[in-house]
Image (cartoon, rainbow, N blue to C red):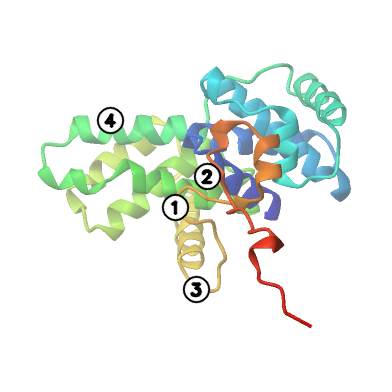
Amino acid sequence: ELEVKDLLSLSQFFGFSTDAFVLATSFLDRFLGLMKVQPKHLCCVGLCCFYLAVKTTEEEHSIPLASDLIRISQCRFTVSDMMRMENIILEKLHWKVKGPTVLNFLRLYHKLILNCSSSERDKMLNLERLESQLKACNCRFIFSKTKGSILALSILALEVQTQNLHELTETIERLRQHSKINDHDLLHWRARVAECLAEYSSSRCSRPSNKKLKWIVSRRTSRQLHSYHHITPLPTIPEASTCTEREP
């Protein structure tokens, strides 16, 4: 779970889209479902999944160098290590990097609900809020084996219940039936989502800020990184010569 939270922090630091983070967690879950990974290699695996997702979803000019990504993440491996691990991951995933994710289901269900509803209150189903809830769920291991359609509809069903949008209950039920989701499964995972979000919003949970993270580093480190990181360097320290000397 800590590794996924690190990926969320990286995603927010670079200002990447929700698509990149969700796809990265999808790659990571799929790979870990196929391979047993030693804890010492988990950082490399996670960062490689993140880099693959970024290269799949982001504009070319926004993609950082692998060396910069390693430096920012403070992982202890080389670019060569990362490239080798990337090839291993791609081979195990059979080079399938553009399949549907839980985010695709969430956006599809949200659009269908809005299209099927004539109520003005359906605007209370804010997509940005729903995506934030999804990112919180992606940081929990319990959801790693959940089908994307079930998790997406569970998040929507909980939000409908929370916002008291009773007129949308029937639409949620039609979506459940059309998606061939068992009623018991939907109730079960809606409850798990509620538990996750309650814990995530509590003061006990340390989580990345919703705002883009900002680091302050020395000028030397700033020169080693590219300008797209938007890093604010530390001010220059005055030379000692500016101080007056004491007389003996």
Which residue carries the number 4 mark? Answer: 112
Badge 1: how crowded within 10 Å, few (<14), some, or many (20+)?
few
Question: Earlier along the polypeptide chain: callout 1 or callout 4?
Answer: 4
Query: Mark 3 falls on what kind of element?
Result: loop
Q: Position of residue 210 (x, y in %)?
A: 44, 52
Residue 87 sits in quarter = top right
Which residue carries the number 3 mark? Answer: 203
Badge 4: how crowded within 10 Å, few (<14), some, or many (20+)?
some
Relative side of 21 to 104, left or right: right
Q: Where is residue 47 in the image (x, y as percent from the top left)?
A: 72, 37
Question: Earlier along the polypeptide chain: callout 4 or callout 3?
Answer: 4
| Whether label 2 touches label 1, CB < 8 Å | yes
Which residue carries the number 2 mark? Answer: 12
On residue 210, which mark appears?
A: 1
Could you tell me if residue 30 is visible in this image?
A: no
Q: In which quarter of the image is the C terminus?
A: bottom right
Please name the residue shown 66% across and 18% down the image. 96
Badge 2: how crowded within 10 Å, few (<14), some, or many (20+)?
many
Residue placed most toward the observer, 124 or 177: 124
Query: Mark 1 falls on what kind of element?
Result: loop
Whether 169 is drawn above or below 19: the answer is below
Please, what is the three-letter code of the amino acid marked with disc 1?
Asn
